[in-house]
């Protein structure tokens, strides 16, 4: 199948590479010239486990190409996938649709023969209708269907999730479009459940899923607060809860709050949509407010550990919003660092993959260390903010020798509290 993908970011690029690996001819389109130049030169533009190898392989095989030209990417396509950003509107916090509207308008004139236009971006309910109208207005003779094809990949596992999705949801209102999408996902026959629903249900499934997961995280964080006061241990509580198949064990890890480019914006967009429809979504609103407060609480915890120290030096391990990615968008770590800086603290940070992206956001406001031990040198408190597995292997004896004061605030429960005590740290984890 010939596929044009608009938007070559955290969704568009792994999707393009994955589709090429399945044997399709893929052209990825992005309006950012520097991104396309880098990709054409064989340089991957974001970090995802396993993506680089597949990217190189499919580039060599000539199955994936990159362009800034809408015409080149669309004119021969059987399927056009829209994977542009839908960031929160700065004022209303609804999903900002300017990139979707621009993509729909720009692609319209290049449609040629029957084409399915699939929206993979996370978009408010009714967007399929709007995309349809924009294309029709610009190109009244176009022969096309618009489908909703929401993306459920987890950053850090994008390649794995592309080839092993939990489910494939398709919101299509015509049989012809359903048939084309069935053909596309033929390699998944018998392995993955495909759910065909109407377009508005499909658009809602994405928001309903992300909001539910955000609430689950908020819930376990509140339960962790309770455990800290009551003498229970959140890891034991979460294990016990997770064994109930109705609850499930995933997303029960307490931490510094949810983040990333999806949950914060999607919960706010869902809340906005609900208000527009006259529905008050109290749980989602509580999760949004609680999550903002959570990051503030974590920053206070860190600052409290050094409140009696003059000009404290704070070592931060982890800047990405989660492990396995270099993405720092809406990262709790970045918000916490921001709060530390507002309180005039000196911060030195290390992240295995996210230093370049963090530097774009923070510039020289913090120091960047070359590894985790360089970060803790002379520090008064160590704050662990992202769950990179290498932080689990910290040699606490070495850390203890390097730090000026022996404080650890472990916001991801990576460190064994007993080991911390044995190495004479004042230690605080989450929910214990
Ligand atoms: P991103 O910002 O990483 O990438 C978007 C890309 O689209 C950018 O490179 C931008 O230059 C390009 N672009 C914007 N307008 C364009 C246009 N008119 N023509 C060509 N290119 C254009 O965004 P992302 O993280 O990949 O997210 C894309 C969408 O997928 C969002 O709606 C997001 O909510 C959704 N989503 C993201 C994830 C995730 O884990 N990142 C998961 C599921 C769904």
Image (cartoon, helix red, strand yellow):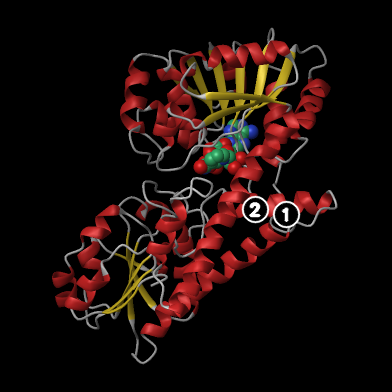
Q: Kindly identify which numbered label has been placed on residue 271.
A: 1
Q: Are marks 2 and 1 in contact (CB under 8 Å)?
A: yes
Q: Kindly identify which numbered label has been placed on residue 163.
A: none
Out of 75 and 20, give the one closest to the viewer: 20
The mark total stands at 2
Secondary structure under tag 2 reads helix
In the rendered view of the protein, which quadrant contains the C terminus? bottom left
Number of residues whose C-alpha sits closer than 10 Å to that of mark 1, classed few (under 14), some (14–19) or many (20 or more): many
Q: Quadrant of residue 340?
A: bottom left
Q: Position of residue 95 (x, y in %)?
A: 69, 47
Q: Residue at x 33, y 50 (%)?
A: 353
Secondary structure under tag 1 reads helix
Q: Quadrant of residue 413?
A: bottom left
381 relative position to 172: left or right: left
Q: Residue at x 16, y 65 (%)?
A: 395
Out of 286 and 105, give the one closest to the viewer: 286
Q: Position of residue 205 (x, y in %)?
A: 66, 38
Q: Kindly identify which numbered label has been placed on residue 267.
A: 2
* Residue 252 visible to an observer of this rendering: no
Residue found at the far right of this picture: 278
Q: Check the image and report above or below for 5 versus 374.
A: above
Judged from the image, the quadrant occupied by ligand 1 is top right
Q: Check the image and report above or below for 383 versus 2.
A: below
């Amino acid at each position: 199948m010939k596929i044009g993908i608009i938007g070559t970011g955290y969704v568009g690029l792994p999707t393009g590479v994955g589709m090429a690996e399945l044997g399709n001819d893929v052209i990825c389109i992005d309006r950012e010239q520097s991104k396309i130049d880098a990709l054409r030169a064989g340089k991957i533009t974001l970090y995802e486990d396993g993506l680089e190898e597949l990217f190189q392989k499919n580039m060599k095989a000539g199955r994936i190409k990159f362009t800034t030209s809408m015409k080149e990417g669309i004119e021969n396509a059987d399927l056009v996938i829209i994977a542009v950003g839908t960031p929160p509107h700065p004022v209303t916090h609804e999903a900002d649709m300017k990139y979707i509207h621009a993509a729909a308008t720009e692609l319209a004139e290049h449609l040629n023969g029957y084409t399915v236009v699939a929206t993979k971006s996370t978009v408010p309910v009714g967007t399929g209708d709007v995309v349809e109208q924009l294309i029709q207005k610009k190109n009244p003779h176009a022969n096309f269907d618009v489908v909703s094809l929401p993306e459920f990949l987890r950053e850090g596992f994008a390649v794995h999730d592309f080839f092993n999705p939990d489910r494939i949801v398709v919101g299509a209102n015509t049989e012809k479009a359903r048939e084309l999408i069935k053909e596309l996902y033929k390699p998944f026959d018998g392995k993955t459940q495909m759910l065909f629903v109407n377009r508005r249900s499909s658009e809602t499934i994405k928001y309903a899923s992300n909001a539910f997961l955000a609430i689950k995280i908020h819930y376990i964080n509140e339960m962790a607060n309770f455990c800290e006061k009551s003498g229970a241990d959140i890891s034991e509580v979460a294990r016990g809860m997770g064994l109930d198949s109705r609850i499930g064990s995933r997303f029960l890890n307490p931490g510094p709050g949810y983040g990333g480019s999806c949950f914060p914006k999607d919960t706010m967009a869902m809340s906005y949509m609900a208000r527009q429809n006259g529905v008050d979504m109290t749980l989602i609103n509580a999760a949004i407010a609680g999550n903002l407060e959570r990051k503030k609480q974590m920053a206070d915890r860190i600052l409290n550990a050094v409140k009696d120290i003059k000009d404290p030096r704070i070592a931060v391990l982890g800047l990405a919003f989660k492990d396995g990615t270099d993405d720092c968008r809406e990262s709790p770590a970045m918000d916490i660092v921001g709060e530390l800086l507002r309180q005039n603290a000196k911060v030195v940070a290390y992240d295995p993959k996210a230093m370049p992206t963090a530097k774009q956001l923070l510039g020289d406001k913090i120091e960047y260390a070359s590894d985790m031990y360089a970060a803790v040198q002379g520090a008064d408190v160590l704050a662990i903010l992202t769950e990179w597995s290498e932080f689990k292997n910290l040699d606490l004896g070495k850390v203890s020798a390097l730090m000026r004061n022996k404080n650890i605030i472990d916001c991801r429960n990576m460190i064994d509290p007993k080991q911390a005590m044995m190495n004479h740290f004042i230690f605080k984890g989450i929910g214990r």
